[in-house]
Image (spheres, rainbow, N blue to C red):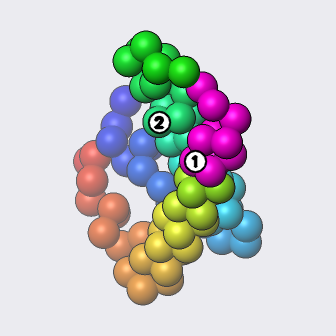
Amino acid sequence: MKLKNLLIKEEDIKGRGWLYHGMGWGIVMFLLMAIVVPYLQGGSLECNRLVRQCIIWMIGGLLVGLMTKYIFLIFGDKKTDNIGH
């Protein structure tokens, strides 16, 4: 599999793609950091803590999505044209 197939393309970010990209990142990070890591460390899951971390990771996901959108607005898809060839 070529590396270029794994990279984000500009058409994936157009419209609301940046939002889906960011929310996906936030959800994955929430699941890993709020549920999986405490479980592996033998900790307990508290409702208040889960709600706080969910809010924090969703805000983080929005920021990741926005940064991705603006990076593609500034640089376009030019940086990935030669990768994987």
Residue at 56% from the left image edge and 53% from the top image edge: 57
Q: Amino acid at mark 2?
A: Met
Q: Which residue is mark 1?
A: 53
Residue at 73% from the left image edge and 72% from the top image edge: 15
Q: With respect to residue 59, does 48 lie above or below?
A: above
State the image coordinates of residue 6 (x, y, percent, origin top left): 43, 42
Q: Amino acid at mark 1?
A: Gln
Task: Specify whether residue 12 is in view.
Answer: no
Q: Which residues are magenta?
A: 45-54
Mark 1: give few (<14), some (14-19) or many (20+) Cα within 10 Å. Answer: some
Q: Which residue is mark 2?
A: 33
Q: Quadrant of residue 16?
A: bottom right
Q: Secondary structure at mark 2?
A: helix
Residue at 42% from the left image edge and 50% from the top image edge: 7
State the image coordinates of residue 55 (x, y, percent, origin top left): 65, 55
State the image coordinates of residue 31 (x, y, percent, origin top left): 57, 33
Mark 2: give few (<14), some (14-19) or many (20+) Cα within 10 Å. Answer: some
Residue at 60% from the left image edge and 63% from the top image edge: 59
Asked if residue 8 is among those painted magenta in the image, a careful observer would answer: no
Q: Pick whichever, 18 or 1, lies toward us.
A: 18
Q: Secondary structure at mark 1?
A: helix
Q: Pick whichever, 55 or 13, lies toward us.
A: 55
Q: Pick whichever, 60 or 51, lies toward us.
A: 51
The quarter of the rendered structure image containing the N terminus is top left
Q: CA distance from mark 1 to mark 2?
A: 8 Å
Q: With respect to residue 51, does 59 lie above or below?
A: below
* Horizontal side of residue 53 vs 20, given as left or right: left
State the image coordinates of residue 19 (x, y, percent, origin top left): 67, 63
- Give the main secondary structure, helix, strand or loop, of the magenta stretch: helix
Task: Specify whether residue 50 is in view.
Answer: yes
Dot placed on the residue nearer the N-terminal end, 1 or 2: 2
